[in-house]
Structures are given as structure tokens and as C-alpha cells.
Image: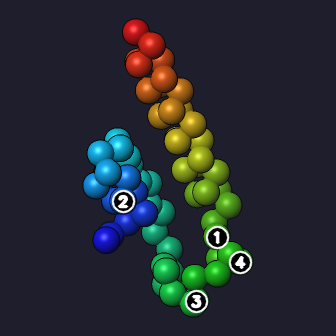
Amino acid sequence: MGSDQMSFSVAGVVSSAIGIAGENPHTPLDTIEKVNRQSLAKAGELMVRIVLITDQLLKK
């Protein structure tokens, strides 16, 4: 089915994905110890900004 957001897109829900490259994604070698905290924080901050801006645009 593809990336996680695809099931939402197929159902007609607007969706997006933010990917952060890493070693061996979605394999047994892809463990929590290998998460880059800075990259995860940046992705989270980006999503918050997108949600807040989208909310403002929808209220207009």
C-alpha cells in the first residue's frame, strides 16, 4: 500500500508524509537507538507549523 499516509489519501483524507532518511528503514535493524533526535524534533516542528498555518487558512 505504500507509505503510512496512503490509506488516508485513498479514503479521501488530505494527507502528507515527511521522511527522514536513515539506515535500514523498516527492517529489524531499524531500532529506537538509531533515531536522530534532532531530525525527529525538526520534523515535529515542521508538522506543528503546517497544522497551525492550515488551521488559519481554513478559518478565513
Front residue of this view, candidates 21 and 10: 10
Please state, as top left, top right, bottom left or bottom right, where the N terminus lies in the image: bottom left
Q: Earlier in the sequence, mark 1 or mark 3?
A: 3
Tell me, yes or no, whether the two marked residues, 4 and 1, touch with CB atoms within 8 Å. yes
As drawn, the label of residue 7 is: 2
Residue at the bottom extreme of this rendering: 28
Q: Position of residue 14 (x, y in %)?
A: 35, 42
The residue indicated by pointer 3 is: 29
Q: Amino acid at mark 1?
A: Val
The local crowd at label 3, few if under 14, some if 14 to 19, many if 20 or more residues have their Cα within 10 Å, is: few
Residue at the top extreme of this rendering: 60
The local crowd at label 4, few if under 14, some if 14 to 19, many if 20 or more residues have their Cα within 10 Å, is: few
Mark 4 to mark 1: distance in Å?
6 Å
As drawn, the label of residue 26 is: none
Q: Earlier in the sequence, mark 2 or mark 1?
A: 2
Mark 1 to mark 3: distance in Å?
12 Å
Tell me, yes or no, whether the two marked residues, 4 and 2, touch with CB atoms within 8 Å. no
Residue that appears at 68% across and 75% down: 32
Q: Position of residue 22 (x, y in %)?
A: 50, 74
Residue at the front extreme of this rendering: 11
Element at badge 3? loop
Q: Amino acid at mark 3?
A: Leu
7 sits to left or right of 35: left
Q: Position of residue 57 (x, y in %)?
A: 41, 18
As drawn, the label of residue 33 is: 4
The local crowd at label 1, few if under 14, some if 14 to 19, many if 20 or more residues have their Cα within 10 Å, is: few
As drawn, the label of residue 35 is: 1
Element at badge 2? helix
Please state, as top left, top right, bottom left or bottom right, where the C terminus lies in the image: top left
